[in-house]
């Protein structure tokens, strides 16, 4: 009889253990390709410390993440730009909420050049003229007599939108080659001596960083922790997490951890900059 009771207790414990596995907290994160590496590192470290939580991270671009948030298919939308008014209105119409914006890191949009390119720095105006197609040859900037080949992000990207709105401030030239992700932009510039691209600082491997200055009379800066922290690098932006409502439960614990000193250490390790 005692043996039967023991077997019964083991079976009950096994069922309880299995059931606890199904009750695992799940958090979905989708959006900015700029933030994918950072978000994956956050998720990996947090899940090691909190094995009862499952975090799924996917990219696709800021616009894709915000659309998923509106459609109810992600818990957190990563974005390298603020939400557009049209997106806020859609969120309000569906959920009667304006959403919650949480700055979680800073990024200096980096201008990528091939390592063999002689050009070292740009003004904001020069970058605008390049991507509008007004400056077409590197010799106009002190470089070789060669056509400038421009690489950029696809229009679902928050980086594309930010660079358009804050730097170019006009239509991109038709000759800009749109690529799916900052890693692809870096790879293109790495292979093209006459190429130029832009994207998140964490992806700049095997290419040269160009200095950027506000205007011809200003000092030029590289995107470093010091220049971004002091507000000296002129193409600095926040990276955001968006939610439909104020976070609760495990999602709140996860976001609180991201904003903690430990979570912000990951920001620095990946190559971005703490949000404070």
Image (cartoon, rainbow, N blue to C red):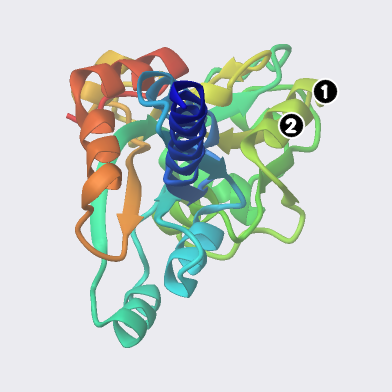
Residue 167 shown left or right of residue 206 in the figure: left
User: Residue 106 location in percent, x, y?
Assistant: 32, 33
Residue 270 shown left or right of residue 229 in the figure: right
In front of the other: 123 or 87: 87
Figure quadrant of the C terminus: top left
> What residue appears at the point 42 percent right and 46 percent down from the top-left corner?
23
In front of the other: 27 or 115: 27
Q: Secondary structure at mark 1?
A: helix
**Residue lying furthest bottom:** 93
Query: Residue 60, relative to residue 85: is it above or below?
Result: above
Query: Residue 90, relative to residue 250: is it above or below?
Result: below
Specify few, some or many for label 1: CA neighbours under 10 Å numbering under 14, 14-19, or 20 or more.
Answer: few
User: Residue 242 location in percent, x, y?
Assistant: 33, 55
> What residue appears at the point 63 percent right and 36 percent down from the top-left corner?
182
Q: Give the number of callouts.
A: 2
Residue 274 shown left or right of residue 176 in the figure: left
**Residue 195 image label:** 2
Q: Quadrant of residue 260?
A: top left
User: Residue 155 location in percent, x, y?
Assistant: 61, 60
Query: Residue 218, relative to residue 128: is it above or below?
Result: above
Q: Nearer the viewer, mark 1 or mark 2?
A: 1
- Residue under circle 1? 191
> What residue appears at the point 23 percent right and 53 percent down from the top-left corner?
247
Whether the residues at callouts 1 and 2 have beta carbons within 8 Å, the answer is: yes
Specify few, some or many for label 2: CA neighbours under 10 Å numbering under 14, 14-19, or 20 or more.
Answer: many
């Amino acid at each position: 009889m005692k043996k039967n009771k023991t077997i019964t207790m083991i079976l009950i414990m096994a069922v309880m253990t299995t059931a606890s596995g199904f009750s695992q907290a799940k958090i979905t994160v989708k959006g900015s390709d700029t933030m994918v590496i950072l978000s994956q590192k956050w998720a990996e470290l947090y899940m090691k410390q909190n094995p009862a939580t499952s975090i799924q991270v996917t990219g696709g671009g800021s616009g894709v993440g915000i659309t998923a948030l509106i459609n109810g298919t992600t818990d957190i939308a990563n974005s390298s730009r603020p939400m557009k008014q049209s997106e806020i209105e859609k969120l309000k119409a569906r959920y009667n909420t304006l959403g919650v914006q949480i700055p979680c890191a800073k990024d200096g949009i980096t201008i990528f050049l091939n390592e063999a390119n002689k050009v070292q720095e740009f003004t904001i105006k020069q970058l605008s003229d390049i991507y509008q197609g007004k400056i077409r040859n590197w010799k106009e900037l002190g470089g070789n007599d060669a056509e400038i080949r421009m690489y950029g992000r696809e229009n679902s990207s928050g980086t594309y939108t930010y660079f358009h709105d804050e730097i170019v401030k006009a239509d991109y030239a038709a000759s800009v080659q749109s690529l799916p992700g900052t890693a692809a932009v870096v790879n293109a510039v790495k292979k093209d001596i006459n190429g130029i691209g832009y994207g998140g600082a964490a992806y700049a491997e095997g290419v040269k960083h160009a200095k950027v200055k506000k205007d011809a009379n200003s000092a030029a800066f590289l995107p470093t922790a010091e220049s971004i922290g002091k507000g000296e690098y002129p193409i600095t932006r926040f990276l955001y997490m968006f939610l439909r409502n104020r976070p609760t439960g495990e999602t709140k614990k996860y976001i609180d951890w991201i904003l903690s000193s430990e979570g912000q250490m990951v920001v620095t390790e990946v190559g971005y900059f703490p949000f404070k």
